Image: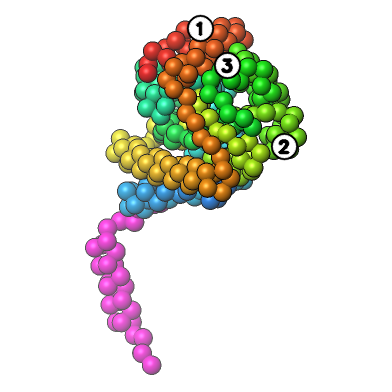
């Protein structure tokens, strides 16, 4: 048995004090909550986890991120409100939600307006997009850490082969009941047929509709390739996820910490893009080998024909207040 004496206690206290001095003063850890509405294994949630790990590493543990997935903190707009009030630190999801606060973000939802991932980056790197981010922060208290977590593009899937707008003329085509989608596809020439997403498989199987459009990586989970054996890689709509933060909290960061947040975000974005690319390759391979799906890609001329048809609907979008006059033309010119 070790006999404890007052002298031993003083020695122990002195030793612990020396260790503490050698280690330096304790640094308080700042805990942050990052919400997503995606499931725990979704690429975006995994990227959020990656961001948290990187930020903790880069700041030597001064910041720790708790990722709360599957909309446990509420639907997207509720989490935006949490960010504004400061009840929540961070949120990452579709950039389209920003249009609820700065309407010109709505132009990003126009099919065929964005020409590939690089075109999307050019648009979001433009002066006018920077003014959107500035307005989002100054008027609504929402700071943008990154808005180029570019998602899988939307494509066309049909029961018979199509290549151009002429091939889609009067085709019964499932379109979401969203003004910009509905009127864009109507301008292309389809017979727009609203069908709930969850009922689309049966509608395709029963011939209620002959095709539809949606994100490439949603096709296998919905089993659409069982009944729609043709996929036209129109890539007609690119979108991205944006990581946002309470504006006042962001402003309170030191310049050095802002740089570390940016570094962690950039790393998370690269991680996300790699996961999406891997998922797309896996899905295309599975659709070809297991479902017998035929893939086609429109030529530049055919894609231009789609874009020209959609542009006819743009004045109506401006008139309805979806976005400002002239912003669609700026988006096209930026690419």
Q: Secondary structure at mark 2?
A: helix
Q: Nearer the viewer, residue 132 or 238?
A: 238
Question: Which disc is residue 325 wearing?
Answer: 1
Q: First in sequence: mark 2 or mark 1?
A: 2
Q: Nearer the viewer, residue 247 or 116?
A: 116
Q: Residues within 10 Å of mark 1 (few under 14, many from 20)?
A: some
Name the mark nearer the viewer: 2 or 1: 2
Relative to residue 301, is residue 287 drawn left or right? right
* Residue visible at 37% across and 27% down in the picture: 118
Quadrant (top left/top right/bottom left/bottom right) for the N terminus:
bottom left
Q: CA distance from mark 3 to mark 2?
A: 23 Å
- Position of residue 335 measured from the top left corner of the image (x, y, whole percent): 37, 18
Question: Which disc is residue 293 wearing?
Answer: none
Could one spot residue 33 in this view of the protein?
Answer: no
Q: Residues within 10 Å of mark 2 (few under 14, many from 20)?
A: some
Residue 204, above or below 14 = above
The magenta region covers 1-29
- Position of residue 162 measured from the top left corner of the image (x, y, whole percent): 57, 25
Magenta segment: does it hold 41? no
Q: First in sequence: mark 3 or mark 1?
A: 3
* Residue visible at 54% across and 27% down in the picture: 96
- Position of residue 107 measured from the top left corner of the image (x, y, whole percent): 51, 18
The residue beneath circle 3 is 166
Q: CA distance from mark 3 to mark 1?
A: 29 Å
Q: Nearer the viewer, residue 195 or 121?
A: 195
């Amino acid at each position: 048995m070790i006999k404890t004496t007052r002298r031993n206690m003083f020695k122990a206290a002195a030793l612990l004090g020396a260790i503490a001095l050698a280690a330096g003063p304790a640094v308080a850890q700042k805990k942050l909550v990052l919400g997503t509405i995606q499931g725990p294994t979704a690429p975006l949630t995994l990227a959020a986890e990656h961001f948290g790990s990187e930020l903790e590493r880069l700041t030597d543990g001064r910041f720790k991120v708790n990722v709360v997935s599957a909309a446990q903190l509420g639907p997207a707009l509720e989490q935006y409100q949490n960010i504004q009030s400061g009840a929540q630190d961070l949120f990452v999801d579709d950039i389209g939600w920003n249009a609820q606060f700065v309407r010109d973000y709505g132009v990003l939802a126009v099919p065929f307006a964005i020409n590939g991932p690089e075109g999307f980056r050019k648009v979001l790197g433009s002066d006018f997009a920077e003014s959107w981010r500035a307005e989002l922060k100054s008027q609504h208290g929402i700071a943008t850490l990154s808005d180029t977590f570019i998602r899988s593009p939307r494509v066309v899937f049909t029961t018979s082969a199509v290549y151009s707008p002429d091939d889609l003329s009067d085709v019964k085509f499932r379109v979401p009941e969203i003004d910009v989608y509905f009127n864009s596809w109507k301008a292309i020439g389809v017979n727009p047929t609203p069908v709930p997403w969850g009922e689309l498989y049966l509608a395709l199987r029963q011939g209620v509709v002959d095709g539809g459009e949606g994100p490439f990586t949603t096709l296998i989970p919905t089993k659409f390739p069982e009944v729609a054996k043709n996929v036209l890689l129109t890539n007609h709509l690119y979108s991205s996820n944006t990581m946002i933060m309470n504006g006042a909290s962001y402003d309170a960061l030191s310049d050095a910490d802002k740089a570390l947040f940016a570094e962690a975000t950039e790393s998370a974005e690269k991680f996300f893009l790699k996961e999406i690319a891997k998922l797309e390759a896996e899905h295309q391979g599975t659709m070809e080998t297991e479902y017998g799906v035929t893939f086609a890609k429109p030529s530049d001329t055919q894609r231009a024909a789609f874009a020209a048809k959609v542009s006819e609907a743009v004045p109506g979008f401006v008139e309805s207040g979806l976005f400002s006059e002239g912003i669609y033309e700026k988006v096209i010119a930026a690419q």
